[in-house]
Amino acid sequence: MRTDTSSQHTPTILDVEASGFGRNSYPIEVGFVLPDGQGYCTLIRPEQHWTHWDAQAEATHHISRSLILERGLPVPEVARKINQQLAGKTVYSDGWANDYSWLGALFDAADMTPAFKLENLRALLDEQQADQWHTVKAQVTSENGIQRHRASADARLLQLTLIRLRTLV
């Protein structure tokens, strides 16, 4: 997959996959892509009291509860790793409200504070770019053959879409 960067600042993009939506949902995977195109992704082993599971969410991201129980990293380890790599950065998400909530659950359970700031990706777009977002995202998806609905793949897709939009101006 091409990770071409423009001369403009390329932001770090983060995405979270979760057990479902709503008050009892929790993060099961977090991924991000740094400005240089390097990515990070990890599954998250749920805390004992994190029991909510939505079959529709699983059908979307194709991550089973048994997979996160088997291969997920413990919550404190995930929070530490994210903080180490994102410390002092402003990180952008296209699902800010949900991702903010899920990261809050992660860091609360780890008894830690995020060392980075999460912002809405929409803040980086002007009106013209916002209007073109879905069309350009579909083009980038098609050109790069992105099919996985997983955290790091989604973050990379969002970053590539933003780069493409900036080159169209």
Image (tube, grey):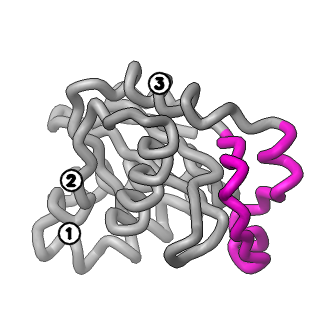
The amino acid marked with disc number 1 is Gln
State which mark lies toward you, 1 or 3: 3
Residue at 86% over, 39% down: 70
**Label 1, label 3: how far apart the Cα atoms are:** 35 Å
Sequence-earlier tag: 1 or 3: 3
Residue named by callout 3: 80
| Left or right of residue 144: residue 118 | left
**Image point 81% across, 36% down: which residue?**
71
- Name the quadrant of the C terminus: bottom left
Circles 2 and 1, Cβ within 8 Å, touching? The answer is yes
Residue at image x 57%, y 26%? 77
Q: Mark 2 highlights which residue? A: 166
Q: Provide the secondary structure element on which disc 3 rests.
A: helix
Q: Which residues are magenta?
A: 43-70
Q: Is disc 2 placed on a helix, strand or loop?
A: helix
Where 47 sits versus 126, above or below? above
Q: CA distance from mark 2 to mark 1?
A: 8 Å
Kindly indicate whether the residue at mark 3 contacts the one at mark 1 (C-beta within 8 angstroms): no
Circle on res. 129: 1
Badge 2 or badge 3: first in the primary sequence: 3
Q: Looking at this rendering, what residue extends furthest in the top direction?
A: 84
Amino acid type at circle 3 is: Arg
Question: Is residue 11 depicted above or below 119 in this figure?
Answer: above
Where is the N terminus found, in terms of image quarters?
Answer: top right
The percent coordinates of residue 76 (x first, y second) are 55, 30
Amino acid, disc 2: Arg
For residue 52, which quarter of the picture?
A: bottom right
- Mark-to-mark CA distance, 2 and 3: 33 Å
Going 48% across and 59% down the picture, which residue do you hit? 140
On the image, the x and y values in percent for residue 149 come to 65, 60
- Asked if residue 156 can be seen in this view, the reply is no
Question: Position of 81 compared to 52: left or right?
Answer: left
